[in-house]
């Protein structure tokens, strides 16, 4: 359904909500809120999906289940919907606060505390910088090689990519990054052998967009540590043998899909999760190879 002819190019918030309301009314969509999918099984005889959900809106702490049947099943819940925390020996007995980055709001309550951020992607770097701004004694685990760029570098690379091959764009961008930041390996940050945009195209890994974290790392105000080995007596043991005690650990270690938790494959034959299989199944925004 198109936007109204008089709608501006950039639709404001109220205009977009109005459009969504009209869309729902036009197509007769009836959303079911506060439902949690428990299982989805394809009935080969009926040629329909059987979807069991929990109704989380019930009162008196009584959770009811509901059954929906449909010829088509579309999963649009997002590929990465559940935060992942790595399996680290001793983490279960850790006495400090341990959260995933999706639970992090700001560093107010961590002021004056020793906090470890695990993960050197954009979330980890931004959280480390925010913690420092709130007065936390901040350390960050940088285990894997990572490219560090500025927003201006990315914008310039996008323009260059219209005229130059990816290899040339990477070479120029890496050279500018080195001029800007110097040799980051001196501070525990290694650069990948492949260029930032080649990695993005081939692996999906994005470069880190620096928000100010690197300057704090270079000044020593944010400490860089290697991978975690284990946790003993509330002390984190790192791969270089160092042991440090922290009041809290924030895991910025990515997300995973929960689809496989409830999607039950047919016992008689497999199906392709691309929207083109025999079971009328479509996943929006997912990578096919992750679900073969």
Image: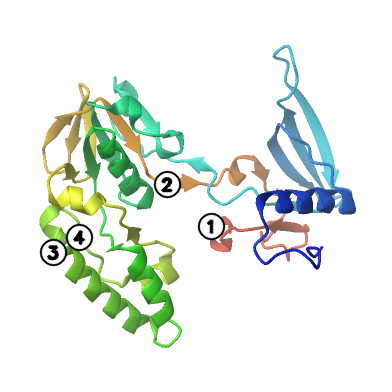
Callout 4–callout 2 Cβ contact below 8 Å: no
Question: Picture quarter containing residue 4?
Answer: bottom right
Residue 113 appears in the figure: yes
Name which residue lies at 34% across and 59% down: 209
- The number of numbered discs placed on residues in the rendered structure image is 4
Name which residue lies at 39% across and 31% down: 99
Q: CA distance from mark 2 to mark 1?
A: 15 Å
Left of 279 or right of it: where is 179? left
- In terms of secondary structure, where does tag 4 sit? loop
Left of 24 or right of it: where is 117? left
Q: Earlier in the sequence, mark 2 or mark 1?
A: 2
Q: Position of residue 289 (x, y in %)?
A: 54, 62
Residue 90 appears in the figure: no
Local crowd at mark 2 within 10 Å, few (<14), some, or many (≥20)?
Answer: some
21 up-or-down from 102: above or below: below
Callout 3–callout 1 Cβ contact below 8 Å: no
- In terms of secondary structure, where does tag 3 sit? loop
Q: CA distance from mark 1 to mark 4?
A: 28 Å
Q: Earlier in the sequence, mark 1 or mark 4?
A: 4
Question: Picture quarter containing residue 136?
Answer: top left
Q: Which residue is mark 2?
A: 254
Q: Earlier in the sequence, mark 3 or mark 1?
A: 3
Q: Which residue is mark 1?
A: 290
93 up-or-down from 60: above or below: below
Question: 210 or 36, which lies in front?
Answer: 210
Left of 80 or right of it: where is 265? right
């Amino acid at each position: 359904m198109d936007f109204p002819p008089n709608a501006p190019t950039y639709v404001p918030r109220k205009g977009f909500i109005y459009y969504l309301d009209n869309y729902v009314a036009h197509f007769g969509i009836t959303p079911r809120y506060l439902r949690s999918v428990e299982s989805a099984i394809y009935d080969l005889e009926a040629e329909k999906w059987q979807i069991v959900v929990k109704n989380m809106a019930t009162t008196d702490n009584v959770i009811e289940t509901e059954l929906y049947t449909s010829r088509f099943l579309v999963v649009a819940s997002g590929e990465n919907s559940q935060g992942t925390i790595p399996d680290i020996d001793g983490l279960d007995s850790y006495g400090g606060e341990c959260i995933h980055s999706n639970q992090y709001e700001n560093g107010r309550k961590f002021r004056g505390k020793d906090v470890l951020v695990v993960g050197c992607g954009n979330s980890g770097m931004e959280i480390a910088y925010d913690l420092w701004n709130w007065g936390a004694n901040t350390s960050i685990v940088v285990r894997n090689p990572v490219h560090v760029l500025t927003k201006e570098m990315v914008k310039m690379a996008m323009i260059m990519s219209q005229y130059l091959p990816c290899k040339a764009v990477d070479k120029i961008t890496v050279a500018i990054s080195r001029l800007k930041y110097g040799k980051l390996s001196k501070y525990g940050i290694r650069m990948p052998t492949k260029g930032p945009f080649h990695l993005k195209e081939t692996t999906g890994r994005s470069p880190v967009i620096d928000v100010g974290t690197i300057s704090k790392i270079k000044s020593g105000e944010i400490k860089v540590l290697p991978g975690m080995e284990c946790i003993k007596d509330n002390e984190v043991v790192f791969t270089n043998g160092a042991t440090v005690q922290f009041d809290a650990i924030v895991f910025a270690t990515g997300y995973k899909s929960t689809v496989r938790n409830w999607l039950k494959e047919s016992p008689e034959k497999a199906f392709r999760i691309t929207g083109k299989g025999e079971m009328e199944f479509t996943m929006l925004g997912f990578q096919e190879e992750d679900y073969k």
